[in-house]
Amino acid sequence: MPTRLGLAAALSIAMVGLAGCSTGPAETAPTAPSGPALSTASTSLGTIVVDGAGMTVYSFDLDVKDSGSSSCTGTCSANWPAVTTVGTPSADGVTGSVDTITGVDGSPQVTLDGMPLYTYVGDQKAGDVTGQGVGEVWWAASPSGAKIGG
C-alpha cells in the first residue's frame, strides 16, 4: 500500500502526464517585459523619466550625445549604475528616442535621445532626486531626453 507521500507523488506524475493530453490550443507562459519600462513620474523637479523600479534616471555631461559610448567608468560606474536592459527597452510617456549602446561592462545600456542613462546610489527610493546637479554634471532626464536644470 503506498504511503501518503508516495500517493501524492503518483498523483502529481499522473497530472503532469494528463496535462499534455489536452486537445485545446497550446498555452504559453507569460513572458516578462523585454527591458526596463522607462516611464515618467512627477517629482520636486517636475516630470522626469524613471526606470522600471521608479528610480530617477540621469544623464552625465561628460557623455557625448550619439557617441555610442559611456564616459562613466570605475568609481563613477559604482556610484552611477547604468540603466541596463535585456532586449529592446520599452517606454511609456517618454517622447525622446529610446535605444541602447554597449555599456562599460558589456551590457546593453539604455539611452534617451542619444544619451546614456544612469541611476544614482544616493537615491534610496522611487521619487528621490538626490543625484540632481551632483558635481554640476549629473541631471535628471525630461521625457524628451533633455536634461533638467544645469
Image (cartoon, rainbow, N blue to C red):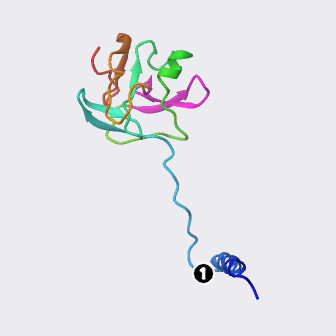
Residue 81 on image: x %, y %:
49, 26
Q: Is residue 125 above or below residue 17?
A: above
- What is the count of numbered marks? 1
Of 84 and 93, nearer the camera is 84
Q: Where's the N terminus, which quadrant?
A: bottom right
The x and y percentages for residue 117 are 44, 26
The residue stretch that appears in magenta: 97-119
Q: Answer with left or right where residue 108 lies relative to residue 135.
A: right
Q: Is residue 74 above or below residue 22?
A: above
Q: Position of residue 42 (x, y in %)?
A: 25, 35
Disc 1 residue crowd, few under 14, some 14–19, many 20+, Cα 10 Å: few
Q: Is residue 70 visible?
A: no
Rendered residue at 58%/22% (across/down): 104
Residue at horizontal 32%, vertical 26%? 129
Give residue 96's quadrant in the image.
Answer: top left
Name the image quarter holding residue 146: top left
Rendering coords of residue 118 (x, y %): 44, 26
Relative placement, left or right, of 126 versus 71 is: left
Quarter occupied by the C terminus: top left
* Residue 34 among magenta residues: no
Q: Is residue 28 above or below residue 119?
A: below
Mark 1 lies on residue = 23
Q: Helix, strand, or loop for circle 1?
A: loop
> Is 103 one of the magenta-colored residues?
yes
Horizontally, is 16 left or right of 64 in the view?
right
Q: Is residue 120 above or below residue 53?
A: above
Q: Kindly identify the amino acid type of the residue bearing the numbered disc 1.
A: Thr
In the image: residue 18, left or right of residue 82: right
Residue 29 seen anywhere in this rendered image of the structure: yes
